[in-house]
Amino acid sequence: MTGKVYLVGAGPGDAGLITVKGLKLLSRAEVVIYDQLANPELLKVVRPGAELIFVGKKAGAHSLPQEAINELLVTKGQQGFMVVRLKGGDPFVFGRGGEEAEALAAAGVPFEVVPGVTSAIAVPAYAGIPVTHRGLASAVTFVTGHEDPGKEESAIPWNCLGKNPGTLVFLMGVKNLPENCRRLLEAGRAPHTPVVLIQNGTLPEQRTITGTLEDIAEQARVAQVRSPAILVVGEVASLRERLSWWENRPLFGKIAVVTRTREQAGVLSELLAEAGARVVEIPTLELVPPDDYSPLDRALGDLSRYHWLVFTSANGVRAFISRLFHRNLDVRALGGVRLAAIGPATAAALNDFGLKADLVPRRFVAEELAQALLPQLSPGARVLLARAQAAREVLPQSLAQAGIQVEVVPVYQARPVKNLPEEARPFLEQNAVDILTFASSGTVQNFAALVGKEKFQALARSAVVAAIGPITAAALREYGISPQVQPEEFTIPALVSTIIDYFAQGGRESHAS
């Protein structure tokens, strides 16, 4: 049976700009054929076992000829697969999607086009430039900037463009930038026309060069602008000074390392990215089941024996509930047990399962949790502590010393990661890190093991080091590193907020000095 091919626009770079329909199709695809301009973050939604085929193109180098890509799409469709052809921007705007659709139609392979947010509009918007604006531009023209200047005749109507009072947006225009500017000037466009050149638009590493039609080529040469880049020509380019927003975010241009587990990194990475940072995830721990489930299973067999169930992490909540469900039980088994959570993230994890924490301490450390619990307990009370296999003994010892019967059950273990992600290596090798974040003492110890103590210290000398709380800060000091950032509230949102405040108060300059 013949399959179906979906020509899906991935958007201009920012992974959040793919359409809802495009993302759904990507998550269901059996084969994904993607190019250089599609954000690799999007591939995280692809289901396990799907075939990923890279056919990317970089300026001046084609990894696979277009004809071969067309043939590949036809072949995979004829083999019965659900295929997503993931293309940067919009498939039908200088994306050669029309050629691919023609090949599929000629072969009788069903296909569907899922438009994407084109870089011709999105990239200027991220630079603070509306391509149309009342009183400045009532028309916009998209132009390929990738035409061979040695051609005898250009397919681009330069004379018309030179007289066009509207906005011109050139895509793929870095290589031919001097020639394109020369032709516009010769066709009558004013030399002082405002121009903006945007490299890596909509991404954390976006760069914007402003100038005029007569000097932008030289400015681009001096700034060593590389593809992908978009050129905006017209009066709307002058609005950038007032409307720039993407590059004005508090952490824009900063490279931030997140050392949490892959499961936990999401919120921290998202908050840092929203503030403008380029996030490099280096998981130092991976979550795996405990060596032995029998202590937990015995506890689950009679939860009514316990007065309190205590959680010291969101991971512990999820692992505990997962095992509860595995044993064909549900949250009703906790009906007679009171719940304590070490902090708001742990309490939120309980809420995800319809459970409300009866107690959350004011400060989110084991010492404070013990102090908050003790007034709630009478001698002989039974407490079940569900936690990581290896953890600090402060909490169970404090409760036991007060005559409380504490039963500790491991619900998961955090195992050190042995290898650095390949994509992170260049940042570490070049010490190209602005912010190092640590959300537990374990991440400190395992990051040191991953990169080595000397490299860790070298990175810390050139970066701002952020610790979520005093225990993590103490672990850093064991390596001779004093964190510059530590929030008063030991939560991920507070950690990011404190990092932002640090830079806003001149931390960048004081750190650099």
Image (cartoon, rainbow, N blue to C red):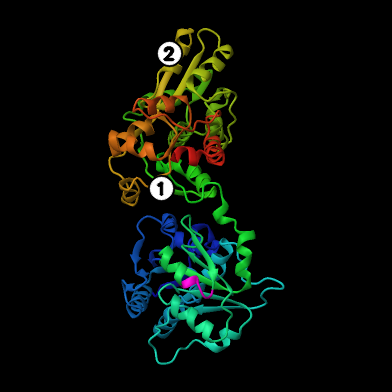
Q: Position of residue 67 (x, y in %)?
A: 34, 80
As drawn, the label of residue 397 is 2
- Please identify, in this view, whether the residue under mark 2 or under mark 1 is nearer the observer: 1
Residue lying furthest right: 135
In this view, 91 is above or below 385: below
Does residue 84 appear in the picture of this structure?
A: no
Q: Position of residue 203 (x, y in %)?
A: 48, 58
In the image, residue 143 above or below residue 27: below
Dominant secondary-structure state across the stretch colored magenta: loop
Left or right of residue 89: residue 417? left
Q: Nearer the viewer, residue 496 or 390?
A: 496
Q: Quadrant of the N terminus?
A: bottom left
Amino acid carrying mark 2 in the image: Gln
Of 38 and 287, which appears nearest the observer? 38
Name the residue: 61% across, 60% down.
Answer: 241
Whichever of labels 2 and 1 marks the residue nearer the N terminus, that label is 1
- Element assignment for label 1: strand
Callout 2: SS: helix
Tell me the residue that label 1 is attached to: 280
* The magenta segment: 213-217
> Dot 2: within a 10 Å radius of its alpha carbon, few (fewer than 14), some, or many (20 or more) residues?
few
Q: Quadrant of residue 193?
A: bottom right
Residue at screen point 42% across, 65% down: 222
Q: Quadrant of the C terminus?
A: top left
